[in-house]
Image: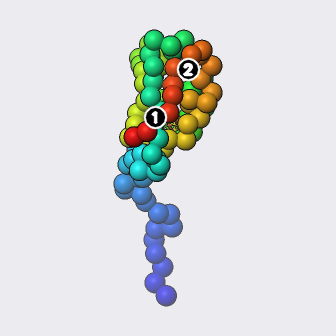
Amino acid sequence: MKKNKYFAGIIKDPGSTLKYKTYVWRDGLKPSWIKKNCTNCLTCFINCPDQAIKVDKDGNMAGHNLDYCKGCGICAQVCPAKPKAIVMKKE
Ligand code: SF4
Ligand code: SF4
């Protein structure tokens, strides 16, 4: 049997989750940010399972990246602002 001189694989084009727009998983609801209510605590950013909360270069909440938001509603649920700074709305 011919021996292969290579013993490890080479991945020339590594995968990236950036290629997978997980918004297609949303089921009718998307988050809506109400900037005037936002205290910039970033609780939403910490809790979003999809890193779909945008933060600007100064570290401030900057809305949602709806390409990757799957509409779970966690950000709206954990937002401590009163009144809420994130609410879930119909698509
Ligand atoms: S709805 Fe879920 S996935 Fe979308 S931004 Fe909020 S926490 Fe992230
Ligand atoms: S959790 Fe609510 S108040 Fe805090 S940064 Fe996010 S939207 Fe703003």
Residue in the image at 41% along x and 50% along y: 24
Q: Which of marks 1 and 2 is nearer the N terminus?
A: 2
Color theme of the render: rainbow
At numbered mark 2, what does the secondary structure look like: helix, strand or loop? loop
Residue 16's x, y, as percent?
43, 48
Residue in the image at 56% along x and 29% along y: 76
Classify 10 Å Cα crowding around label 2: few (below 14), some (14-19), many (20 and above).
some
Which residue is at the front of the view, 5 or 37?
37
40 relative to 52, above or below: above
- The numbered mark at residue 40 is none
Residue 54 visible to an observer of this rendering? no
Say whether residue 10 is left or right of residue 78. Answer: left
- The numbered mark at residue 89 is 1
Classify 10 Å Cα crowding around label 1: few (below 14), some (14-19), many (20 and above).
few
> Badge 2 is on which residue?
84
1 relative to 16, above or below: below
Which residue is at the front of the view, 2 or 40?
40
Residue in the image at 59% along x and 35% along y: 74
Q: Quadrant of the C terminus?
A: top left
Residue behind label 2 places its C-beta within 8 angstroms of ligand 2: yes
Callout 2 amino acid: Lys
Callout 1 amino acid: Lys
